[in-house]
Image: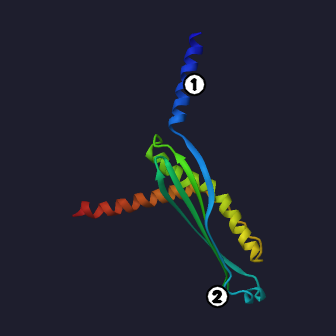
Amino acid sequence: MADEQQNAQANGAAQNEQQKAQFQIQRIYLKDVSFEAPNSPEIFRKEWKPELSVDMNVANNKLGDGVHEVVLTLTVKNKVGDDVAFLCEVAQAGIFTISDEIPEQAKAHTIGAFCPTILFPYAREAVASLVSKGTFPQLNLAPINFDAVFAQHMQQQAAAQQQQEQPKADA
């Protein structure tokens, strides 16, 4: 009987913690999209030896108490020789509830890695669809490990902060 009460209290405490520290997807939407094929139709006559470059950016905007907009922007540029075959930019966004009870470091990881991981498949599909509609060969972007990207970003920030503090120590 005592064990049941302890289990019930432990479960109740765990549920309270989950209610305090919550994460929820409110909405996922396409915020901005652009597709250009500036050298068509001439580009279709060239031998297809593309040079693909992909740039990525993650931005966030606090909308209110515990509500954040996270925007994953993918810019895909494909060149054949010196000519741009296509330029595709997709800004895939989401509105997420990230409660203020989540510690700052965990909140930064959620915004910088977890949310972009959720948004990436939508952005990747939008890019693939636009490229296909431009009648270019199918383009499937490789998955991105946003945890690793976030960790690298944090290391770069720490190194930059260390460099800024060094001259002060030397002075």
Of all residues, the one furthest to the left in this rendering is 171
Q: In this view, which residue lies farthest toward the front?
A: 64
Q: Residue at x 60, y 49 (%)?
A: 26
Colour theme: rainbow
In this picture, residue 133 sits left or right of residue 117: right
Q: Quadrant of the N terminus?
A: top right
Three-letter amino acid code at the position of disc 1 = Asn
Mark number displayed over residue 11: 1
Residue 89 coordinates in the image, percent (x, y): 62, 71
Q: Disc 1 to disc 2, how far (Cα)?
A: 63 Å
Q: Earlier in the sequence, mark 1 or mark 2?
A: 1
Question: Could you tell me which residue is drawn at 51 percent across and 52 percent down?
Answer: 68
What is the quadrant of the C terminus in the image? bottom left
Q: What is the x, y in percent for residue 154? A: 46, 56
Give the SS element for disc 2.
loop
Q: Which residue is mark 2?
A: 82
- Amino acid type of the residue that numbered disc 2 sits on in the rendered structure: Asp
| Element class at badge 1 | helix
